[in-house]
Amino acid sequence: MTAITDIPTSRETTTRHSVLPALLPFLGVFMLAMILPFVSNDYWALIGTRAAIYWVLVAGLNLVVGFAGHLAIGYVALLTLGAYTTSVLAAGNVLPPVPIYGALVIASCVGAVFGVIVGLPAMRLRTFYFAMTTLGFATIVTQIALAWQSVTGGGIGIVGPEFSAPFNTPWGFYYLCIGFAAVATWLSANIAYSRFGRALIAIRDADVAAEATGISKPKLLVSIFLLAGAMAAFAGGLFASLQTYITPDAFTFDLSVLFFIAILIGGRGSILGPMLGTIILTILPEIAAPLAAWSTFLYAVLLLLIVLVMPGGIAALLDFKSRRPLASNRAIVPRIAGLAEVLRKTATTKTLTLRDVVLTFGNVRAIDGLDLDVKPGQIHGLIGPNGSGKTTTLNVISGYYAAKGGTITLGDDALPPGMPELRAGKGIARTFQTPRVIGEASVLENVMVGGTIEGEATFAEALLSLPRHHRDERKLTAQARAMLGVVGLESLADVRADRLQHSELRFIEIARALMLQPDFLLLDEPAAGLSSDEITRLGVLIKAISRRGTGVLLVEHHADLIFDICDQVTVLNLGKILAAGTPAEIRVHKEVVSAYLGG
Amino acid sequence: MLGSIIASGLAAGAIYALVGITYNTMFSTSRVMSFTAGQLAMLGGVFGSLFMLKMGMPTLVGFALTLIACAIIGVITEFVAVRPVLRSLEQHLYVLSTLALALMIQQVTAIKWGTEPQPFPRIVGLGTGVWDEKFWLPVVACGLTILGLEYLYRRTLVGHAFMAIAEDNFAARALGLPERNLRVASYALAGVIGGVAGFAGGELMLAFFANGALLNFYGFVPVALGGLGNNRGALIGGLALGLFQQAANFLVGGIFSSVAVFAIFIIVLLAAPQGLFGSATARRV
């Protein structure tokens, strides 16, 4: 008991130890940026300013590309939009002139709106489609800038906004942009290392599991697109000021390529990597002057090399921690005693009830009139031959399929058909037949994803790193660590999940599901691929979970486990109930024995 | 005016449809949407102009050489940008590798050929006004390509093998079909189709390096509308897009036609992600 209460304090100190080394490279880059004026000339002020402005955009885009995994290749469009909006407002050739800072703010708002519009298709489609939409947007923004002469000046262009003293000298403006870049880094890091950042990675690498933990993809993506769009347009305003005079020619697609490739060279899910990538790509054509005309070609070659040779980018190169070998003789030893501390006793008296549920795929009746009652505090086994509809039943309950007939109720409330992301809020958690774990995140982060909807701080609070957000993080971290202790994976908390063994992934999934403090836990073949020792321990763990009042629905092929721990068993065959009753009844049921168990 | 809208709309639409079919041809054997589709069509124009105007070759020789050159680029796409990433589990890598190759093609063209649009020679020399060959040539080329593909897919053994791989890659390999060689062949075929699009549309669009990016987008719209891998959908979608775009162009002006096309593209993607003629997506859980 004391061990558990000690956890928050020990975690506190480890966090402080681990944050400082992570900050050092950023401080190093910042220090270098601060001393640049004393060791170089105005030409380098221009390049340094450019790198800082690009980073303001890339820091936001990084959340879209590097964290959410959406391939936005046309973000120069938002830079263009921001540049023209700021310039037009500051010049006052359409409306009365607006002070430059006001113009920047308005431009950011416009950028935020367009960031969402361009991002809309990403809600439903990934990869190529989204890449194409952003590319298409980039094409039309340039065309509009050319054609809308009364506002943008067409091909002749428009004067960029000018900052007042002390920011009107090259070095003054440089320091201003470095300041904005630092703020941009801070904002994007706040999101990246919050529950929103983890949810983004979850959507990217394990979207089905993300839905089951209650992460609302559209809401989250809209927030991210708002932020990235605003930052891009803000960068556009600064860019226009740097250029002093802007024409559509200034916004070539090459810039888009630079932004995008900087992130990929930097590595997904990292902030330091893309920052270094941006700096390198900005400087590269300058130090090799003959290459300037070939810069895009060079970027493209780099992109191809990254994809083919080094998919992890700079971040993977710098990730020394993940190259240390793990202990090979490790065993998963759940500490059941700790369960009482982390899993609150479920007060629910509601029963999860399925009545006459039907699901068809074409002419196949995958589930054909299924009745099922999962009672709180009980373990309900669901067994049957392959293709009998066990996993499908789980998928109907958790909303991945909408039943064609029948009702699913939780107490007196009907569960809406479909809509898997609403199940977590109703207290239903689940695991998957093939573990759906975020390989690139640490084990601890994977488990913390399970508690995403438990957090109270809003996106804006996380963005600005306000107290409530810190409280959330502390609570989630402590809870996840304790949960890992319960399932017996505490020593692996900081290891990347893709380095773990299959059986360990199964226990991560259970820990993640328990983070919801679920009333009902749906387990899809949790014992598949486990050794017999591990199965025994799993059985003890499941039993302990159900004793906390959680109703467990267990799909399994290991008959021993089922008969050992279940209170009720339902046997399915071809989508229909073959038999239902206590384990003792099922074990001697004639048809079950002949059809499934073998006699 | 109606005549010019229809003539230019059908011509542009035929080119878009051909680029869409280029996408589909590469997609069918590899499940990869390649950014090089539009670049192949751009190269069709540039190579045609290079061989016939700059080097003074006869039309037929220039045409043949253009197609061969584009087929080679298609095969290079397969070797450089597709084959290495097909083995990878990361599904999105092909977007990046083909984008990288497309950018290289575009940049090399920009530097070696120039960034100004350059003229494309007259090929047949028939027709004036709305019956000018620059309008009907793309339509005829599109029609012949479709007929040729239908013949290939329905009547020839190689065509059947293509269909088998498109339908079920694993089963086709289990039957002993040389999947890898067929994939290379389909990329060469895609190169030829892209080359035809660029060559036939050369007089309309000129030999211009920036056509690649433009055709990448406008060629993809019919594919998105018609559903991935659906050539009939791409044809209908392409012609509809061309007519719509040209009508908007003549009636309300250029910018608004691009905005309208973009808006429709996004709305259709949101309403019917699988395309208007496509089938629903596969199961996820």
Image (tube, grey):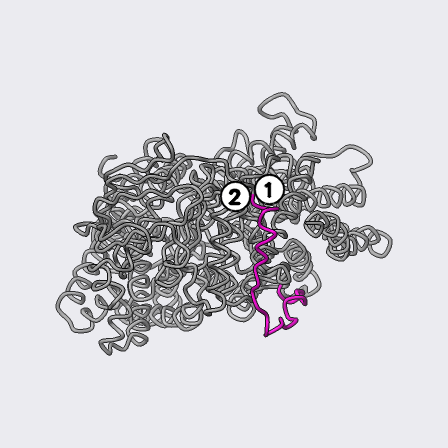
Residue B262 rendering spot, x and y as whole percentages: 39, 40
Which dot marks residue B15? Answer: none
Magenta-drawn segment: A316-343
Residue A443 rendering spot, x and y as whole percentages: 58, 58
Q: Earlier in the sequence, mark 1 or mark 2?
A: 1
**Could you tell whether A330 is left or right of A289 in the image?**
left
Given the current orientation, which residue lies at the most extreme left position? Answer: B155
* Chain of the residue under the numbered disc 2 shown in the image: A
- Residue B212 sits above or below residue B62 on the image: above
Which secondary structure, mark 1?
helix
**Could you tell whether A47 is left or right of B109 in the image?**
right
- Residue B190 sits above or below residue B126 on the image: below
**Membership of A318 in magenta stretch:** yes
User: Is B234 in front, or is B206?
Assistant: B234
Residue that numbered label 1 is attached to: A232
For badge 1, the amino acid type reads: Ala
Q: Residues within 10 Å of mark 1 (few under 14, many from 20)?
A: many
For badge 2, the amino acid type reads: Leu
Residue A49 rendering spot, x and y as whole percentages: 72, 48
Q: Nearer the observer, disc 1 or disc 2?
A: 2
* Residue plotted at (22% across, 68% down): B164
Residue that numbered label 2 is attached to: A516
Given the current orientation, which residue lies at the most extreme right position? Answer: A38
User: Is A73 in front, or is A519?
Assistant: A519
